[in-house]
């Protein structure tokens, strides 16, 4: 069936989708410039394989917690079917598939301006939902392995995300990260915790608007081949700077520091990136830091928390200590701003049925240890920088310059 890949109201390309809703053929390209980032060849032409990767990544991942059990209750529902039920619309960007046989109007269907069903969100969260299901929802294109749903409150779009058993700690981690970044003056998406039916959920407002869209780091880097001698970190910085963005290195360094403090295990290339202007297609800047829940030994028994064995780290190194070495300046970091943060963190856990006092205090103590370790590292880093400066000054004096 022929569909037109759209960017808001603008035609990008006509494509033929097969019965599995994969792109079989790119029929006509109307606007090469508006093809999704990372889906073009070096000559600027559309790459069908990469376009299929991009399109497939707009489906709910099969790794989503509880997905199989919830979909089994609704015959014929699969991630690819759900994707097409809402034409691939998302709250992260402005692309969608318009059926040529029965064309639709962006103004009437986009989720930024129009109400949407919460049935799919309720279904995927294991909650009660209406029947028959209304399947027009941005939940059909949501990413990530944790249960989540989009919700409209006071006219604004919010993402509500669950935690995982046994501690359901991820929502609290999001709130802790928000506290840290508030104090450190780091641009981020604020999260708060709500309790529904005794379970905790993190809630954040959508930071993508009618005028902007998120382009993940993975797609930012697809447009340029990385030379073998260039690290992934430097390659990403170079790709961003090629878009005439300034201060990218400092913003990424801030993310690395936050992930070090939080012991974030899942900063993959799809949960950080850049913000782009929808009309001009120019990049505006680095996206605020978001999605820091998979952290602070969230999936460990309390007595096992603190161990760094088999501790995952992403996206640039597999070890947090090594990744921290990528940071070239800590001049922006004021760790004294984190003093006396313990009471604020304790207050987050007041209504928790799954995190007892022992685990709560363990989380606080381990975070204090991370702060102390970072302070020591920064002091040693500053001393080594000063030593280098002294050596340069002495050499210049010796040479008579």
Image (cartoon, helix red, strand yellow):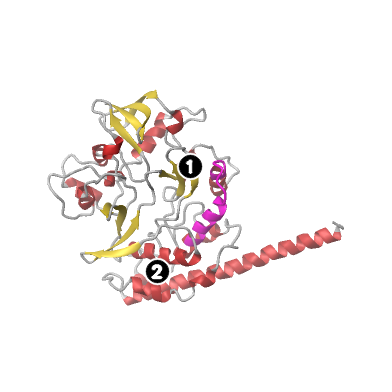
Q: In which quarter of the image is the N terminus?
A: top left
Q: Where 120 falls versus 319 (above or below)?
A: above
Label 1: how many Cα within 10 Å (few below 14, some 14–19, many 20+):
some
Q: Which residue lies furthest to the left in this view?
A: 131
When asked about the image quadrant of residue 295, the answer is bottom left
Residue 383, percent from left and from top: 67, 67
Q: What stretch is highlighted in magenta?
A: 240-258
The reply, left or right, for residue 266 in relation to residue 354 is: right
Q: Distance between the residues labelled 1 and 2?
A: 35 Å
Q: Is residue 244 magenta?
A: yes
Please name which of the two marks, 1 or 2, marks the residue nearer to the observer: 1
Q: In the image, which disc is placed on residue 220?
A: 1
Residue 299, percent from left and from top: 35, 63
Query: Can residue 372 be seen in this snapshot?
Result: no
Instruction: Identify the element where label 2 is drawn.
Output: loop
Q: Nearer the viewer, residue 171 or 260?
A: 171
Q: Residue furthest right?
A: 400
When asked about the image quadrant of residue 173, the answer is bottom left
Residue 261, percent from left and from top: 48, 65
When asked about the image quadrant of residue 397, the answer is bottom right
Query: Can residue 202 be seen in this snapshot?
Result: yes
Q: Does the magenta stretch include residue 94?
A: no
Q: In the image, which disc is placed on residue 372?
A: none
Q: Residue at x 38, y 37 (%)?
A: 53
Residue to which mark 2 is pinned: 305
Instruction: Identify the element where label 1 is drawn.
Output: helix
Q: Residue at x 26, y 53 (%)?
A: 151
Looking at the image, how many numbered discs can be counted on the residues?
A: 2
Residue 229, percent from left and from top: 60, 43
Q: Quadrant of the C terminus?
A: bottom right
User: Overall secondary structure of the magenta stretch?
Assistant: helix
């Amino acid at each position: 069936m022929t569909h037109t890949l759209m960017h808001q109201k603008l035609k990008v390309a006509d494509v033929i989708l097969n019965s599995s809703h994969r792109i079989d053929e790119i029929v006509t390209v109307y606007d090469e410039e508006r093809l999704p980032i990372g889906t073009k060849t070096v000559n600027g032409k559309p790459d069908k394989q990469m376009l299929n990767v991009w399109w497939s990544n707009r489906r709910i991942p099969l790794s989503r917690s509880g997905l199989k059990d919830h979909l089994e209750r609704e015959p014929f529902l699969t991630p690819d079917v759900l994707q097409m039920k809402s034409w691939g619309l998302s709250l992260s960007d402005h692309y969608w598939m318009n059926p040529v046989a029965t064309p639709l109007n962006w103004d009437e269907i986009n989720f930024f301006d129009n109400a949407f069903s919460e049935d799919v969100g309720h279904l995927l969260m294991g909650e009660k939902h209406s029947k028959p299901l209304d399947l027009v929802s941005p939940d059909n294109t949501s990413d990530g392995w944790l249960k989540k749903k989009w919700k409209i409150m006071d006219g604004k779009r919010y993402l509500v995300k669950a935690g995982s058993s046994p501690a359901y700690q991820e929502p609290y981690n999001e709130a802790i990260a928000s506290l840290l970044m508030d104090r450190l003056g780091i641009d981020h998406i604020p999260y708060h915790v709500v309790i529904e039916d005794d379970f905790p959920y993190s809630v954040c407002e959508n930071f993508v608007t009618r005028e902007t869209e998120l382009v993940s780091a993975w797609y930012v880097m697809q447009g340029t081949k990385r030379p073998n001698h260039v690290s992934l970190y430097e390659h990403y910085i170079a790709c961003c700077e090629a878009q005439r963005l300034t201060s990218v290195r400092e913003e990424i360094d801030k993310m690395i520091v936050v992930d070090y403090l939080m012991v974030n295990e899942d900063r993959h290339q799809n949960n950080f990136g850049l913000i782009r202007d929808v009309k001009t297609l120019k990049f505006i800047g680095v996206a605020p830091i978001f999605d820091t829940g998979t952290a602070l030994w969230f999936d460990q028994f309390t007595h096992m928390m603190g161990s760094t064995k088999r501790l995952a780290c992403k996206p640039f190194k597999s070890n947090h200590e090594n990744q921290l070495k990528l940071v070239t300046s800590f001049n922006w970091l004021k760790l004294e701003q984190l003093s006396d943060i313990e009471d604020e963190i304790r207050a987050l856990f007041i209504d928790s049925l799954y995190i007892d006092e022992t685990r709560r205090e363990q989380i606080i103590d381990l975070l204090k240890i991370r702060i102390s370790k970072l302070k020591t590292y920064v002091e040693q880093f500053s001393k080594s920088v000063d030593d280098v400066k002294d050596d340069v000054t002495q050499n210049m004096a010796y040479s008579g310059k």
